[in-house]
Amino acid sequence: MITSDRMAQVDENAAALGVPRKQLMESSGNATARVVREHADPGDRVCVVAGRGNNGGDAFVAVRFLDDYETETFLLGREETISTDIARENWDALQDAEYTTEEVRDSANFDLPDCDVVVDAMLGTGVTGELREPEATAAEAINDSDATVVAVDVPSGVDADTGQADGVAVEADHVVTFHDEKPGLDSLDATVTVADIGIPATAELFVERGDLRVLGRDPSAHKGDFGEVLVVGGGPYTGAPALAGQAAMRAGADLVHLACPEQVAREVQGYEEGLIVHGLAGDLLQPEHVDELLDRALDVDCVVVGPGLGRADGTLDAVREFLSSFDGTAVVDADALRVVPDVDTEADLLCTPHQGELVDMGGETADDWRERRKLVESFAADLGQTLLVKGPYDVVSDGETTRVNRTGNPGMTVGGTGDVLAGICGALASTQEPVTAGAVAAHVNGKAGDAVVDEQGYGLLASDLLDGIPRAMWGDRE
């Protein structure tokens, strides 16, 4: 079962893995034609009602596999408004081969002829809401016909995730959907065929550019919509919490607070004016600071605990006490990871150990990423929390959903890159589920590091990653 948003990500991931959308469209069209052939006799009349996007493109391909039938294709709109290059190429192929086609430029003039099978390819899984014209009129005409109706991916007007329709929707007899079943199809009175169109399983496992679609922003968004983060760190170290805080800002958090012992507060503030630094009395994090931290945590969307805290007497006790009383979302990094296996918490944790820290937590690791994936998944299930285990291949799992990231390079073994990752995780966990946040953060952190090494070779500094974070998240996804 896969949602429409996730399906769009997987489509794009498949392209990143070398399986272009054009190839998938050819497979989708062929699968659609197979279903049509199951419900039509040779010589039957098949009418295709197609939209101007890739859903219509799938149907244009299908027509080329239906030469045993009398086909007629209706394009809802002008051909110059076909919205994707691959759909246009397949429309042009129908023209060049002189298949019977017609542009429907005015819904008032749409007249669906008598036919034995109608293929509904107006709108796919990515379009929701009430049908507009000319699709609404076309849907009514399809429903009024006596033909068998085959819908491509989802009946037009039906929400693929819920099965609900806002107004008129195509009443399909059969649905051919691709790669995996969509949640909303279960509620339909239709036969559903799930067609394998050649998307590799790793398009769902490996983190690729399609996963970055979750980073899109609504133009009408307001301050605060993209998260407020509190970083709890520092004492023995100043650079680690500063890197985590700056990374959270670079990763799009609207506000970043940093709570650190007052002896390092001034130095931490000096790294970036935009950080809101709160000094904690004394030289180290101690249990007497927990109440203040819990109060500050009430006002943020995610807390990052660990960068630069060290493991002095009282510090890990304070972390344990904080997590025991906290019920929000937290990213746990560095020495703070040591308390996680034994703490009883209502919080949703995203833990970011490297493999040595994972072993210290009680987990197991392996050289082969496939075996490591299984071990991480099992340990995450035991913990009841999400793990992001850093390595040549990063493994992210909550025990049920597991993702593997392949960006990054050996130059990132330098100190501080994990603090940057923790900050990115904090920003993303403010708005995303922990597995998604961890997977995207690992990809972005590694991609930023790859860009630095591509430009200058090894010898990078963790601070070199900061400027690359926005480009890795929102730059050219190709």
Image: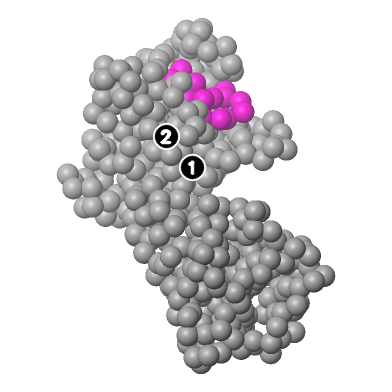
Q: Give the number of the disc on residue 11.
A: none
**Farthest residue toward the left?**
367
- Front residue of 284/118: it is 118
State the residue at coordinates (69%, 37%): 219
Q: Pick whichever, 461 or 319, lies toward us.
A: 461
Magenta-colored span = 240-257
Name the foreground residue: 118 vs 341. 118
Quadrant of residue 400 within the rendered picture: bottom left
Q: Which mark is residue 444?
A: 2
Mark 2 touches mark 1? (CB < 8 Å): yes
Secondary structure of residue under mark 1:
helix
Specify the amino acid type for callout 2: Val
Where residue 183 appears, x then y in whole percent?
A: 55, 68
- Tell me where residue 409 appears, x and y as whole percent: 27, 31
Q: Which residue is mark 1?
A: 212
Q: Is residue 306 above or below residue 144?
A: above
Q: What is the magenta segment's predominant secondary structure?
A: helix
Q: Tell me which amino acid carries mark 1.
A: Leu
Answer with mark 2 or mark 1, whichever residue precedes in sequence. Answer: 1
Query: With 327 as the anchor, is 411 left or right in this view?
Result: left
Residue 358 versus residue 160 in the image, above or below: above
Residue found 49% across the figure and 42% down from its top: 212
Identify the element where label 2 is drawn: helix
Q: Is residue 113 magenta?
A: no
Is residue 419 in view?
no
Q: Residue furthest bottom?
A: 41
Q: Residues within 10 Å of mark 1 (few under 14, many from 20)?
A: many
In front here: 417 or 147? 147
User: Residue drawn 45% across and 32% down?
Assistant: 472
Asked if residue 360 is positioned above or below residue 417 in the image, the reply reads: below
